[in-house]
Amino acid sequence: MDFLALVYFGDELSVQQAGNRLTEKRKDRIFQKLLTMGHPVFLPYRAAKVAFIDSDTDWARELITQARELNNSQQNPGLEHSVTCMLDILEARLASQV
């Protein structure tokens, strides 16, 4: 899944292309495991997929909240900052859609 296509670009074509890539990876067990993992690094990707491909913004917001709570446990401050930035941008994009 392409976080940039879903969150930064967000136009109809980008969302459709990200959805197509996600469909192609449906049989990739490692990718599917990462996408459903409850780790704060992977939760922003899952939230973007849920929000923009599955059109479930309420569940996406719950995933964002979960990621923020878990992000404090990161041992790498740089990774924690990156996840925080991704979540901030994702939340702003969700807020602009309402």
Image: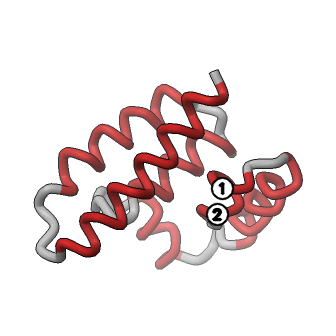
Q: Position of residue 73 (x, y in %)?
A: 11, 61
Mark 2 = which residue?
A: 4
- Residue 46 lies left or right of residue 74; in this view the side is right
5 above or below 93?
A: below
Mark 1 = which residue?
A: 8
Q: Position of residue 86 (x, y in %)?
A: 44, 57
Question: What amino acid type is highlighted by mark number 2?
Answer: Leu
- Name the foreground residue: 40 vs 92: 92
The quadrant of the image that shows the C terminus is top right
Q: Residue furthest top?
A: 98
Which residue sits at x=28%, y=72%?
79
13 above or below 42?
A: above
The quadrant of the image that shows the N terminus is bottom right
- Name the foreground residue: 82 vs 70: 82
Q: Does the CB distance between marks 2 and 1 fall below 8 Å?
A: yes
- Name the foreground residue: 47 vs 83: 83
Q: Position of residue 3 (x, y in %)?
A: 59, 62
What is the C-alpha distance between the residues marked 2 and 1?
5 Å
Q: Residue furthest right?
A: 13
- Residue 22 lies left or right of residue 88; in this view the side is right
**What element does badge 2 sit on?**
helix
- Residue 52 lies left or right of residue 20; in this view the side is left
